[in-house]
Each structure stands twice: as C-alpha cells, then as structure tokens.
Amino acid sequence: MWILVEMVRSFTIFLSFATFAFVQARFCSDSKKGVCEISDSGSFCYHNKTSGQYNCDDQGYCANKENIKGKVGLAGCYATNADDEPTDCCCNKGQLCNLAMAAADPENNPELQKCTYLVDESDQDTLLYKDCLEPYCLSFMHSNLIGTKTTVMHGCETRFIYKHVQAKQDFENYGNNTDWQATEPVYNYPRCSDILENVVPNINGTKRACLDLFFKLNGESVKGKLCCCNGSDNCNEQITWNEPVIRLEDIRSDNNGLANDSYHSLTNTVPFILSLFLSFSFSHYF
C-alpha cells in the first residue's frame, strides 16, 4: 500500500514537471509545414534571407555555430564571411521568432507581404486586426449547407496553423478550447507552398488558388473553401465564395503538411512520458 501511495505521489510530481516541459515547447515558422516545434533547451528556429526559407534549423546551421551553440534567449543573423551580408538567422526567443525577425526587417525579406487579418461570423461582430506580414496569405470560410451560419477568416498561414495547434493542445490537456475543430480540415490539407506551387502568377505577379472542403462540425455537414495567395499586399482581402477552385488531386504534395509529422510527434509525447514514468517508478521501488 505504501508503495502504491508513493508511486501516485511520484506520478503527480512527474506529471507536473512533464506538463511544464510540454507547455514550454517552442514553435518556429516552417516554409513547408506551416509551423514546426523545437525543444526549449538551446534548439533554434532558422531563417535564410536569400532563399526565404523558414524551418527548425533542419540543416543544423545554428546548432553547429560555435559562438551561439547551446545558448537561449538569442536572436541574430550571421554572415558566412566577414565581408558578406548576414543572411543566416537563428533565434530561440519567443514563439515564431524566425518569422518575427523577418517581419521586423521586411526590406531584406522580399518573400513577405501584408495579409488582411479578420474574422467575420454571421452572428457576431467582425473582428478586424492589424495586417500581418508573412510569405503566404490565407482565407478560410465555412458555412452550413443552407448558408445560414457562415464564418470567414482572413489571415496569415503560419499564425493560422500555430493558433490551431495551440487550441488543440489546450483541448487535449485541459478540455477548455474547441476552436481547433473548425480549423482541423485546413490543418489536414496541404500547405500554401504546395497549393500554389504550380499556379501561374497573374499580370501583377500574384499567385492565388482555392480548394473546396466538405466536413462535419458539431455533427452538422459543412462546406468550406481554403484559399492561399502571395506576391502582393492584401492579396487575400477580396477572396470570396465565388473564387474558382483547383482539385486536390492536382496538387503535387510530397508532404501533406504538419499533420503527418510534426504534430504527430507532439501527440506521441504523452505515451513517451508515461512509459518513462513507469520505468522510473518501478526501477526506483523494485
């Protein structure tokens, strides 16, 4: 009996620590996945000003740079040679820090454009936010089949995916946030980089493409439309239900977004923590 009580006590302490560690996860903007996750112990978000690529230091540039290796709360850009412009940027300070660094210097990050940012629900006041600055603008709208309940969201892809992941984690950890249910179809679809890859830009250099979605929300059949664009400021502002669509089958997508890798690694964290605790407990008491 004493052993059982001590194991429960240890599990409570362990779970508190694990939850704290889980909450401290840090997210980066990722050009292909929307967002990716790093540990909060010296790992880095990465951005290259020349290529316009964002990721979780996939090639290990930041991790292998001697003067910043293992440091936290850091943000800076570096040159390969002393006479070169600093184009390789590393950071582990705050959420989506590689995107924040680029947005603070838009003149040297030409892949960025302003995106209209608002949420308009049929039974509520429109929420209008300051334009966001990202490589891809996004619009997502959904409605019940008779059109009496409609939601339209305009914004930036990375922030959209990040908010979805946050909401889903809140729901799984605390059961207090169901916002992710409406955006889950977008999360499971290809990212804007894939959707726009084979799209021919219009006369002013803007790429725009939309996909139709059909899904269930709170047990009700729902129709939706997901649109991506880039190449000009506020390219998502005028997107409506009437936009022409492309077929999902026509999109060349080798990686169907975060849902297939990064987020699954998050959901695998809980079983890993549980197995680690059991190993610790039984080795400690037996």
Image: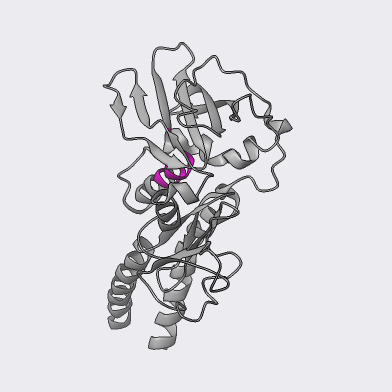
Work out whether 265 lies above or below 18.
above
Q: Is residue 168 left or right of residue 53?
A: left
Choose between 20 and 156: the one closer to the eye.
Answer: 156
So how many labels did they put on this image? 0
Choose between 144 and 191: the one closer to the eye.
Answer: 191
Q: Quadrant of the N terminus?
A: bottom left
Residue 158 placement (x, y as % from top left): 47, 45
Q: In this view, does 60 lie to the left or right of 254?
A: left
Q: In this view, does 272 lie to the left or right of 4?
A: right
Residue at left 53%, top 69%? 79
> Which residue reaches farthest front?
83
Residue at left 63%, top 24%? 203
Residue at left 40%, top 30%? 116
In the rendered structure, which segment of residues is drawn in magenta? 155-163
Q: Does the magenta stretch include residue 156?
A: yes
Q: Image quarter for residue 277?
A: bottom left
Residue 214 placement (x, y as % from top left): 56, 25
Residue 262 placement (x, y as % from top left): 54, 56
Work out whether 19 lies above or below 239.
below
Work out whether 40 lies above or below 114.
below
Q: Does the magenta stretch include residue 278?
A: no
Residue 249 placement (x, y as % from top left): 72, 32
Q: How is the image coloured?
A: one colour
- Predominant secondary structure, magenta span: helix
Q: Quadrant of the C terminus?
A: bottom left
